Amino acid sequence: MMTVIFNKARMYELHTLFTGDQSCKMAGINCSTRPADFTLKQKELSMESRRHGLSIGIERTGELFFLSLKAQGKLTHQDYETITPMIDSALKEVKDPKVKVFLDGTELEGWEPRAAWDDFKLGLKHGNEFQKIAIYGNKKWQEVAAKLSHWFISGEAKYFEDESEAMRWLSE
């Protein structure tokens, strides 16, 4: 099951923050950007309903991409089978994309083994395109992951416990 949600307010906020352009109106962001916000792959586990998956927002201005990701629950291989083609498709349109990522991991519980491998492959494939990755979280292992990420990406990754601080750092 795939649910698609378009969140214009959030994408307008991100567009304004990263481009300084306030001419785009809430009624229709018709700039050189392509906002999208998707909620992907939610699944029931045992008797209780638990959400898992990735939500993604993609905004582009010229060669600059801003990915906004929210991870929930324990990520699966199927989550990556859905999200990877979206990221690949967005980045292949530009010769030398420069990507800034905001990852909200406050509801992330981890990965299934195959999903961890998928995440590793995604990092290797696009690692040279990432300029900055801000990991907004609340778990010690997320801070460690941010520190280890320099092995797989050419840009910077930093862990934050404050969302607005993470967004400020990305906009520098």
Image: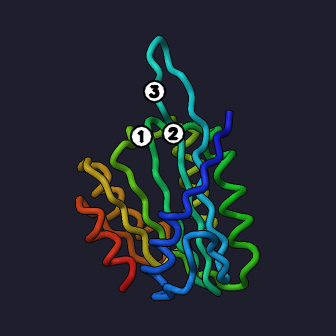
Q: Residues within 10 Å of mark 1 (few under 14, many from 20)?
A: some
Tell me the mark number nearer the camera, choosing from 2 and 3: 3
Q: CA distance from mark 2 to mark 3?
A: 12 Å
Looking at the picture, the colour scheme in use is rainbow
Residue at figure coordinates x 60%, y 69% from the top left: 27
Residue wearing tag 2: 75
Nearest to N terminus: mark 2 or mark 3: 3
Residue 141, position as x, y percentages in the image: 29, 49
Residue 143, position as x, y percentages in the image: 28, 57
Tell me the mark number nearer the camera, choosing from 3 and 1: 3
Q: How many marks?
A: 3
Q: Residues within 10 Å of mark 2 (few under 14, many from 20)?
A: many
Residue at the outermost front position: 27
Nearest the viewer among 91 and 154 is 91
Asked whether disc 1 touches disc 2, contact meaning CB atoms under 8 Å apart, the reply is: yes
In this view, 169 is above or below 108: below
Residue at figure coordinates x 57%, y 33% from the top left: 42
In this view, 171 is above or below 153: below
Q: Would you say 81 lies left or right of 15 here?
A: right
Query: Which numbered marker is on residue 110?
Result: 1
